[in-house]
Amino acid sequence: MTTIDEEVEWGAIREAAAQGGARQVARGVIQRAPEERRELWRLALRRLDDRESPLRSFETIIDVAQAGIDDAMTLSNQARDAESAALWADAANVLSYNLSAALADCWPDDPDPRERHHFEVGLRAAEDCIRWRWELGKPPDRRAMGYWAAGMHHLSLGNVMESWGAFVTAEKLARGTVKGSHGAGVEPEGNFGVILYHGYAGIARWVMGEDEGRRDYERACRAFEGTGHSDPERKEDADFGLEQLRWVERKFVAGKG
């Protein structure tokens, strides 16, 4: 695998974005060798999504991600063997998920307003990601992430039933990654994905007016609150999940009241 000098490459990408936006960034990446482009597309998307950067623009993020996805799928279709084709399809899958996550309206530290078309683009990216992850044989937890992203964009678009269905699917897939019964429940020290997606599904049910949804959401919050007291890393993850659920609840439940 090619290793690029990220700071040097980011300097060139940043200059291209400042001068000519996504088109200029794409022009520079396409000129590079195929084995370098996979890393460059990911670097460009990650750094252009920096919430502290004055260059950050959802339109630029969308255009750069789509250029990278198109490039990856072109190279996948042109590949001479199945392994190379899958490698490039996976590059498109990663870019698609990262695009969907960047556009999702669920991050407590990212209050920048989104517009409806951002959620529509994010939903399409999530659906593409789901398809690729099934085709590539990704493990259940990776497929669950795609369904979570689809559910979040459905929620933002007001498609609450579809949102709930996607979150439930994500939770079921996450449960499939847990060995044995321990950790499969919505309980302290349980599986992060199981707890998070259960909480999201609860929020969707709550938005639909079902009080059981509120109880599911609160159950997930208690599980995160009771996780990681003897493990700083697990506590950090649990705090992140808890903060995210509470932010989404305030936006989509309390904010509608």
Image (cartoon, grey):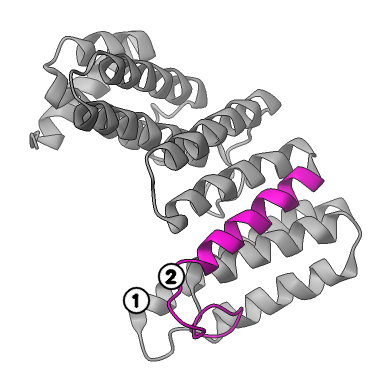
Q: On the picture, is 181 further left or further right than 105?
A: left
Residue 133 in the image, given as x and y percentages of width and height: 43, 41
Q: Is residue 48 above or below residue 218?
A: above
The residue carrying mark 2 is 237
Residue 246 in view of the camera:
no
Amino acid at pointer 1: Glu
From the image, which quarter does the N terminus lie in?
Answer: top left
The residue carrying mark 1 is 233
Amino acid at pointer 2: Asp
Residue positioned 32% across, 17% down in the render = 17
Q: Nearer the viewer, residue 19 or 130?
A: 130
Q: Which residues are magenta?
A: 161-189
Q: Secondary structure at mark 1?
A: helix
Q: Quadrant of residue 21?
A: top left
Q: On the picture, is 87 further left or further right than 214?
A: left
Residue 208 in the image, given as x and y percentages of width and height: 88, 54
Residue 100 in the image, given as x and y percentages of width and height: 51, 36
Q: Is residue 225 above or below residue 155?
A: below
Asked whether disc 2 touches disc 1, contact meaning CB atoms under 8 Å apart, the reply is yes
